Image (cartoon, rainbow, N blue to C red):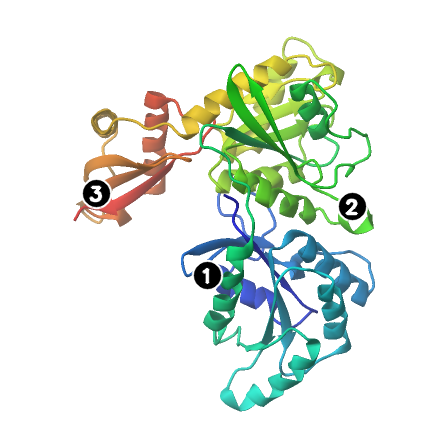
Amino acid sequence: MAKPVVAIVGRPNVGKSTIFNRIVGERVSIVEDRPGVTRDRIYNTGEWLNYEFNIIDTGGIDIGDEPFLAQIRHQAEIAIDEADVIIFMTNGREGVTAADEEVAKILYRTKKPVVLAVNKIDNPDMREAMYDFYSLGFGNPFPISGSHGIGLGDMLDDVVQHFAGISQTDYDEEIIKFSLIGRPNVGKSSLVNAMLGEERVIVSDIAGTTRDAVDTTFKHNGQEYVIIDTAGMRKKGKVYETTEKYSVLRALKAIDRSDVVLVVINGEEGIIEQDKKIAGYAHEAGKAVIIVVNKWDVVEKDEKTMKLFEQNIREHFLFLSYAPVVFLSAKTKKRIHTLVPEIIKVSENHSQRVQTNILNEVIMDAVAMNPTPSDKGKRLKIFYAAQVAVKPPAFAVFVNEPELMHFSYERFLENRIREAFGFEGTPIKIFARARK
């Protein structure tokens, strides 16, 4: 099930990014967490009262050379499109401004719940200032302080109350759900049509033709599938065409609802930075991934071209080293038959469970081959391991002291597990846990 999406909307300098960082629990403005993952962090995952949700900081959506009020309006409109619940952020020190009223006018048009927050109310003496904000017409405003973390709990209590009314489409576990993500005009709609064998999706050379994600079900050799088509990652119009970050926002819900994510690349144009940004979220969401190189029919090639192109992919997508690469042409349907078997394989690996006794044999053989690391006279000791989850497969390794589990040794264990059990196409997670 897709996580609900919460957007923080408001004019500049009201503290949107501060509140965003408070909710996600860390400072995340433009960070690279691991080699190969490069994407702009205007979204992240928050949690409150056992609810997980995606959260968008619209302050990070750069509209370019648009006038001041036009930028605010466009950012709010993007939030309205993508969010299930909207936090309308204002500044209690400055009172209600014309820009606040501009944002309010836009939010009046949405049928989505709006939670009004008055930021920078740093002490009780300032609470009288918030009464002016009732005039915005969104009910009781919540006095908060982003710099001190005051009042966020009450605000989030109100936010998560609205999650119950959000409708989600659920499918049976046996149905394989996959989405297509990628920049505009890489051929996602054409690929959907080629797989379905009919023109169900509008295909055009104009980027942004497909406006919204569309679910399409089909059956192949007795197996049922749902295609969550995200061809409309960037809407037609100046705002969306000049806002590359929007393509990531459009992918969030579809990826969350998917078991398998097809990262579609234009074989004619090659790899660009935006491809890596879009693929980064699929990886971090723990989904099975296939890299699909489309438009392979128009690439001038010899017997080495495919191998060299795959090497280039591996160098750029270090964090997707486990993902298979499929070369095809949606237009001519050449090699299109190779895609469904890969989807089945990575889906099965994504939900694969391994027997505990065999897993521990693999782990102990790995330790015998490469002894555990030590630090300051203390050596890591591994007692046993167990698989604790699927989608993606996750393994708890019980040890004497978890802090002795170095990242490089964790990666070594992951490689040994992959050699033993496959897991092609799916990330796997390893957690060091103290034995109790």
Q: Residue at x 49, y 35 (%)?
A: 287
Residue type pointed to by label 3: Val
Please state which of residues 87 and 246 is positioned toward the viewer in this rendering: 87
Q: CA distance from mark 2 to mark 1?
A: 31 Å
Q: CA distance from mark 1 to mark 3?
A: 28 Å
Residue holding disc 2 = 241
What is the x, y in percent for residue 278?
61, 40
Residue holding disc 3 = 399
In this rendering, does residue 424 appear at all? Answer: no
The kind of secondary structure element at disc 3 is strand
Q: Dot 2 surroundings within 10 Å: few (below 14), some, or many (20 or more)? A: some
Label 1 or label 3, whichever comes before in sequence order: 1
Please state which of residues 26 and 96 is positioned toward the viewer in this rendering: 96
What is the x, y in percent for residue 325?
56, 22
In the image, 151: left or right of 269? left
Q: CA distance from mark 2 to mark 3?
A: 51 Å
- Indicate which label's residue lies in the foreground, 1 or 3: 1
The kind of secondary structure element at disc 1 is loop
Q: Residue at x 64, y 8 (%)?
A: 303
Quadrant for residue 165, please give it.
bottom right
Label 2 or label 3, whichever comes before in sequence order: 2
Please state which of residues 168 and 126 is positioned toward the viewer in this rendering: 168
Quadrant for residue 174, please give it.
top left
In this rendering, does residue 352 appear at all? Answer: yes
Residue type pointed to by label 1: Gly
Residue holding disc 1 = 25
In the image, 239: left or right of 17? right
Q: Dot 1 surroundings within 10 Å: few (below 14), some, or many (20 or more)? A: few
Q: Dot 3 surroundings within 10 Å: few (below 14), some, or many (20 or more)? A: many
